[in-house]
Amino acid sequence: MANDTAVTTSMANLRAHCSQDVSSTRFWRLTSEQRDETFARLREREPVSWQRPVEDAVSPDPDDPGYWAVVRHTDIVTVSRDHRTFVSGHGVQFDLLPTEVLEMSQSFLAMDPPRHDRLRRLVSAAFTPKRISVLDDHVRTAAREVVDGFARETGEIDFVERCAAQLPVRVFADMFGVPYSLRGSVREGAAAIMAWADPESLAGRSPAELQMTGCTTLHGIASELVAWRRKTPTDDLFSGLVHARIDGQQLTDAEIGAFFVLMAVAGTDTTTHTASLTVKALGDAPDQRDWLLTDYDARIHTAVEEFIRFASPVMTFRRTATRETTLGGQTIQPGEKVVMFYSSGNRDTAAFHEPARLDLSRNPNPHVGFGGGGIHYCLGNQLARTTLRELFRQLLTRLPDLSAGEPDLLGTNFMRGVKRLPVTFTPER
């Protein structure tokens, strides 16, 4: 196996790197629109291109030969759904992160069958339709109360701080039974894990130190919750995880902790950023906002899909090839990394008419905002949709002239995150 790996690495090093470099720190500091121009050229000329290793990796590998960049919608779906050829067990992050962080945060996202299937079945046992339906009322109440918190104020706030970051954390906390006293720590821990390449968030710390701080914080909270729920079970999701059994098996404390970290990030950061980017997009396209408000209940389900496609908060994920295969005209060898660029797939003109335009009536809308399908499709997709639906019901019906300034974006190659977003509105009477 070692000799095969050496041969594969040697062959990969001989590949000609693509002229469109998507590995540099400079590229990821461009605006989304500027990056979209590069992705458009790649989709047309080199839909699967060999790229040099990512620049300024958190945990660089001196033997890393590079990776295949997959930018077309159809190829992203192919990779996503073929979990035998393209596996997750060797890592799913575009950036190279410390092994300890990956083990503490990835859960079944970075596993392959049969381990993936066992863990996902156990987790899914706690995500029953009955449990999720009970959460709908909690989400509706939480959305109303979060907007209550600022709707009658001066009419100028940081939308991320006062709204977009508040609601998903509250929903997550209700779902997992996290007490109020620990909710701020959940938000801070999840944000730290996702901010590893953002200079402001680092504040002099190393990326690995920042991520480990976030992971340790969240694992500590999970340990407290496990102990409480073993002694005093309730009807929240965390009790479901602690006591779930499939064929007599239970989750270990480490597995519960890693899943808690994964859901804290996936269930809070992604929805926060989608909401923030959507507020900005609706302000830039008032005709779309008016269209939605004309018949909110009938149109919001279609609109939410466009919120997710247009925002594309998760920009990249990777897989590793297990066997020789052909994709986009290129021959991929076993052991080579394949990175899916979701933000490019969601702007592919072969899959979407006028993809640069916000179109809330877009139907069908085969976006890859929750992944391209397959066994790793986002487990919390319905909860995310519900949260966005109820939040924008409150915002658009109560603050119809809500207007956003320019977002201050997070500097990473994984999450299209919003750190701050100034908004103005006429206070509710």
Image (cartoon, rainbow, N blue to C red):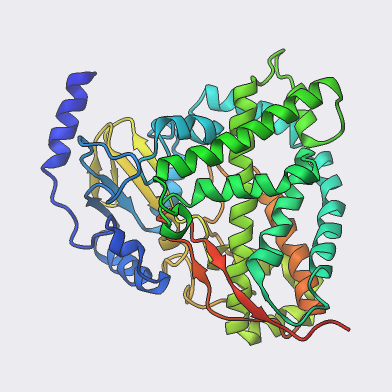
> Can you say which quadrant of the picture contains the C terminus?
bottom right
Question: Looking at the picture, how far across and down is residue 160, in whole percent?
Answer: 63, 66
Lateral position of residue 318 relative to residue 172, left or right: left
Lateral position of residue 213 relative to residue 423, left or right: left
Residue 365 visible within the image: yes
Question: Looking at the picture, how far across and down is residue 174, in whole percent?
Answer: 80, 45
Lateral position of residue 83 relative to residue 324, left or right: right
Question: Looking at the picture, how far across and down is residue 348, in whole percent?
Answer: 42, 66
Closer-to-camera residue (125/202):
202
Q: Is residue 158 above or below residue 333?
A: below
Question: Looking at the picture, how far across and down is residue 204, in whole percent?
Answer: 40, 52
Image quadrant assignment for residue 220: top right
Q: Is residue 286 above or below residue 83?
A: below
Closer-to-camera residue (395/421):
421
Q: Residue at x 39, y 50 (%)?
A: 340
Q: Residue furthest left?
A: 14
Closer-to-camera residue (401/88):
401
> Can you say which quadrant of the picture contains the N terminus?
top left
Residue 372 visible within the image: no
Q: Is residue 398 above or below residue 363?
A: below
Q: Residue at x 72, y 47 (%)?
A: 183
The total number of labels drawn is 0
Q: Residue at x 17, y 53 (%)?
A: 17
Image quadrant assignment for residue 232: top right
Image quadrant assignment for residue 272: bottom right
